[in-house]
Amino acid sequence: MKIGLIGGGVIGGGWAARFLLNGHDVVMYDPDPQAPRKIDEMLENARHAYSRLTYAPLPAEGTLTYAATPEEAADGVGFVQESAPERIELKRELLGAASRVAPADVVIASSTSGLLPSMLREGMTHPERLTVGHPFNPVYLLPLVELCSPSPETVERAAALYRSIGMHPLVVRQEIDGFISDRLLEALWREALWLVNDGVATVEEVDDAIRYGPGLRWSSMGTFLLYRIAGGEAGMRHFMAQFGPALQWPWTKLTDVPELTEELLAKLAHQSDAQAGGRSVRELERERDDALVAVLQALRGARVGAGGTLADYERTLLEQATVQSDALRWETSVLPEWVDYNGHATESSYLLMTSHAADELLGAIGIDAEYLRSGGSYYTVETHICHLDEAKAGDRLVVTTQVLGADEKRIHIFVRIARDGTLLATTEQMLLHVDTNAGRATAAPPHVLERVQALVEVHSSLPWPERAGRRIGLPSGAPS
Amino acid sequence: MKIGLIGGGVIGGGWAARFLLNGHDVVMYDPDPQAPRKIDEMLENARHAYSRLTYAPLPAEGTLTYAATPEEAADGVGFVQESAPERIELKRELLGAASRVAPADVVIASSTSGLLPSMLREGMTHPERLTVGHPFNPVYLLPLVELCSPSPETVERAAALYRSIGMHPLVVRQEIDGFISDRLLEALWREALWLVNDGVATVEEVDDAIRYGPGLRWSSMGTFLLYRIAGGEAGMRHFMAQFGPALQWPWTKLTDVPELTEELLAKLAHQSDAQAGGRSVRELERERDDALVAVLQALRGARVGAGGTLADYERTLLEQATVQSDALRWETSVLPEWVDYNGHATESSYLLMTSHAADELLGAIGIDAEYLRSGGSYYTVETHICHLDEAKAGDRLVVTTQVLGADEKRIHIFVRIARDGTLLATTEQMLLHVDTNAGRATAAPPHVLERVQALVEVHSSLPWPERAGRRIGLPSGAPS
């Protein structure tokens, strides 16, 4: 479908990127002569983001062309999205122009952050096909889009298109300035401005007060569900009884609060029960915690905010850890992020477990943080994995490492991954000692070799593993 | 260090879990006879979370004992944390009792969400060692803790302890009701209550208006930095000029707003520049996007909120994708989450790329979503990886798959991963056709075998890979 876009700023450009990357052709009207350059840059960012976001094959990118007038942008397209500045007269003019060109069955959406659809539609031809379609920056990544229109058919048609490009439509059932999300954002924003205005905090401190704490929760759950959980076993009514009085305390400059009537309390409790959908507080806690753990790990990977805190913490833990006597036996659970859509642990997760087992082994022979900083390390040069059975999320696994042999540069190990005595996978690896500064293999120093040889000695009494030294091949297929 | 905890509700129990899992012994005072049961359950949740949070070795868990009085909980400990209900008289009584037992050099912290330290310290012995230490639920996972005390030494000593258990201390420099974070939360919460009270939205809709949109951003960046980015190239002053007028619009019920004086605008612009620290808007956009992509992927793994939206979107993309003629050649960038602390792609990431290449191959031979639903699939039974060189984040890699052979149940493949023609790794795999319902190997159906044989035919003209059929072993070490 060809999409007409009116307005190519941060929001309109974001729409262009989302539609184009989802294979739609786009016709853009924006009077700013800089618009093409800015949109190109935004599109470049979006391509970069999508190349990481998913392995799923995206359709071939659509084509972007520019229109000289809003009418031209609405001509012959299947959907119009307006993202002009928040000035009602300007928006009315543009929406009116588009509506006089686009046939009656073309939905016209406005990206307005908070202007009412009943005001926007004034002067439009076929005004019933107008809906608010309010996205969030960056439009090409955030799923939320708020829809608001008196016509259910218009809402449903817009929602279907938005869903097809990876978005989550939220229908705002009642016309209200700022809709739902911006009312919440605006309340927080106004309070944030007061804090800076009054010299209580800097903009950075205000931001940190969110991203190291409540912001982490908000990526997976909203305030109502979080407070229900915080209320503990007694539920939402208990939470309100406990924290309701704080509503009267001067905890914000914005002091107007609804009265906690029995009617409001009953409504909150009832809607909160519906939202929990029968999940107990313990179950909700687990869901909250699993999401938080996943988000913290994601941010650790990106080295951002709370992810940086976690990385620092882990570095400390690793530096404090003494060599464990049971370094060659390690237990773990199958993490939810290790399983595929069939619920089985992925191939990569077995290799992750092996890497961890190898790290434990290296710890046991003296390869610690200090050693790594000095420029010595063991790298894996070869790995052979055999899969024998499957593991599911939550399965408790035991990972054991056998040292098969070593010389001054190499260590040959064999790792078994088992559940309740059943072998699920084996991994054989060759590790090579390297000088990481010079980037080449070198002999390990005597104090390391000593410990390696001690392990080889101890393990020499163990039986040679059946699957060590295997090669892959079909009985017939491979040339010898 | 032994820690004295006073109050074992949701917050105190969370502190108990964080301290215990970090190896500290804990003495807990809570008059609720249900406290031990509730704390045990919370500790179980926390153990579960920590077992997934990090591979780093945690110290041996501390010991939890119960005290009959607040004095007993403060006796002989190195740090006291009070987490009683938000009633000033009760908190004063408990803090006073603890202060009469704990030596003057023991820091006493209060978890209060917003009561002023100057009020809390009344009646304490050595009141200068009191600090607010306000955590966020779940205390064992969220890093943020707000500190507020007139004594810099007290603040620094508390901050050091909190940092050592993985937290991010934020010093609130000015005594203010609600400190920083709760003022922001409270403003949003009050507006949320209005929305439900007025029937505009249900609690679930309010929550969705956060977690599918702005909440995803807040996990890595706060509002000020996000708005700076949204302002585009022109910076914070431009953003305020553009959106400042909206402060006068009725976008919240909480309408008291600071006047946008030149002084406030200059302060915002100056502090925002400091926060950006010289990063351009394009750089900040990339940082924001990288964090968002990582968070969305994390939530997809946990199948929560926006992660569910992404999973649905990917399913649609996969189902729409037609078999690509270039299925056996695939390009990718090294994602930031694939690299280790040395900046190199991890072993697992090579296997991930291989899995993806194998998935593309399976797509090309007709193993699509429909086929998988019908209960047929190919599983990897054996993998052999050779590492030849390293890849860094952002490197553009080409992954090619060669089919070495096949029979009615098996496909033998060889995958090469290269950068600019330099081979970084090779992966050899044996794939086995299975009936996933019966859980056993079966012959693939004729329409699949036909395509497999066509590929074997095409690839039979390629040279046999040098590293195919390798076994791992030391020249001397392995028995034959």
Image (cartoon, coloured by chain):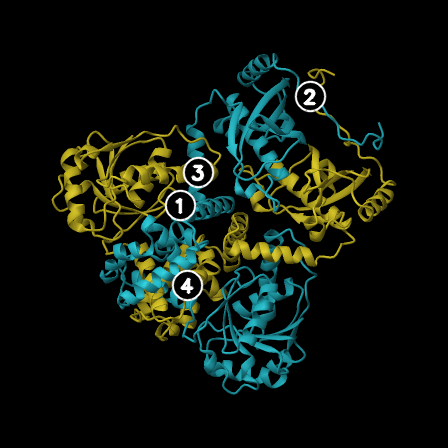
Chain colours: A yellow, B cyan
Amino acid type at mark 1: Arg
Q: Residue under circle 2?
A: B466
Taking A388 as reference, is A161 left or right?
A: left
Give SS at disc 4.
helix
Q: Residue under circle 4?
A: A206
Q: Name the residue nearer the viewer: B94 or B221.
A: B221
Amino acid type at mark 3: His
Give SS at disc 1.
helix
Circle 3 crowding by C-alpha within 10 Å: few under 14, some 14–19, many from 20: some
The image shows residue B202, relative to residue A96, as above or below, that is below
Q: For the residues labelled 2 and 4, say whether their Cβ atoms are less than 8 Å apart.
A: no
Give SS at disc 2.
loop
The image shows residue A258, relative to residue B277, as above or below, that is below
Q: Residue under circle 1?
A: B282
* CA gap, disc 2 and disc 1: 45 Å
Q: Position of residue A204 (x, y in %)?
A: 43, 61
Quarter that holds the N terminus of chain A = top left
Q: For the residues labelled 3 and 4, say whether their Cβ atoms are less than 8 Å apart.
A: no
Circle 1 crowding by C-alpha within 10 Å: few under 14, some 14–19, many from 20: some
Q: For the residues labelled 1 and 3, say whether their Cβ atoms are less than 8 Å apart.
A: no
